[in-house]
Image (cartoon, grey):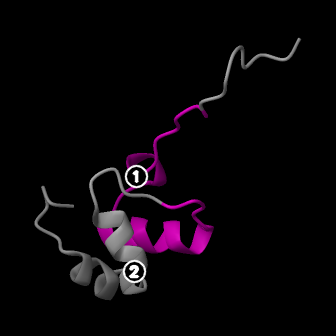
Amino acid sequence: MAQRGISAYALSRGANLSYPSAYRLSRPHGGFGRLNADTLDRLCAFFQVQPGALLEWTPEKRGGNSRPK
């Protein structure tokens, strides 16, 4: 968001999100524990992008071998 010059306040107003939610998303490496479909839809509409432009999958870190035996 910093690259686009968008503040947390502008995101909260433009995407109709609560300020705390917008603030968490505006932080470097910011994110949510979970993200519901309505919030994702609001973000996509605000930024005019598809969900894939906003999401990145990262595997969970687990101790040892993560494959079932």
Q: Nearer the viewer, residue 30 or 41?
A: 30
- On the rendered structure, is 1 left or right of 49? left
Label 1 crowd (10 A; few <14 / some 14-19 / many >=20): few
Q: Amino acid at mark 1?
A: Leu
Quarter of the C terminus within the rendering:
top right
Helix, strand or loop status at disc 2: helix
Residue 20 is labelled as 2
Residue 67, how many percent across, how many down?
Answer: 77, 16
Residue 51, how many percent across, how many down?
Answer: 47, 54
Residue 55, how many percent across, how many down?
Answer: 46, 48
Does residue 64 lie above or below 48 as drawn? above
Q: Quadrant of residue 5?
A: bottom left
Q: Amino acid at mark 2?
A: Pro
Q: Quadrant of residue 24?
A: bottom left
Report the residue at 45% width, 74% height from top.
42
Please check the rendered image and state whether residue 62 is part of the magenta-colored stretch, yes or no: no
Does residue 20 lie above or below 3 as drawn? below
Q: Which residue occupies the extreme right position in the image?
A: 69
Q: How many labels were placed on the picture? A: 2
Where are the magenta residues, as a range?
A: 32-60
Mark 1, residue position? 54
Label 2 crowd (10 A; few <14 / some 14-19 / many >=20): few
Does residue 6 lie above or below 29 as drawn? below
Does residue 16 lie above or below 63 as drawn? below
Q: Quadrant of residue 68?
A: top right
Quarter of the N terminus within the rendering:
bottom left
- On the rendered structure, is 62 left or right of 6? right
Please check the rendered image and state whether residue 45 is part of the magenta-colored stretch, yes or no: yes
Residue 10, how many percent across, how many down?
Answer: 22, 82
Choose mark 2 or mark 1, whichever is in front. Answer: 2
Report the residue at 51% width, 61% height from top.
32
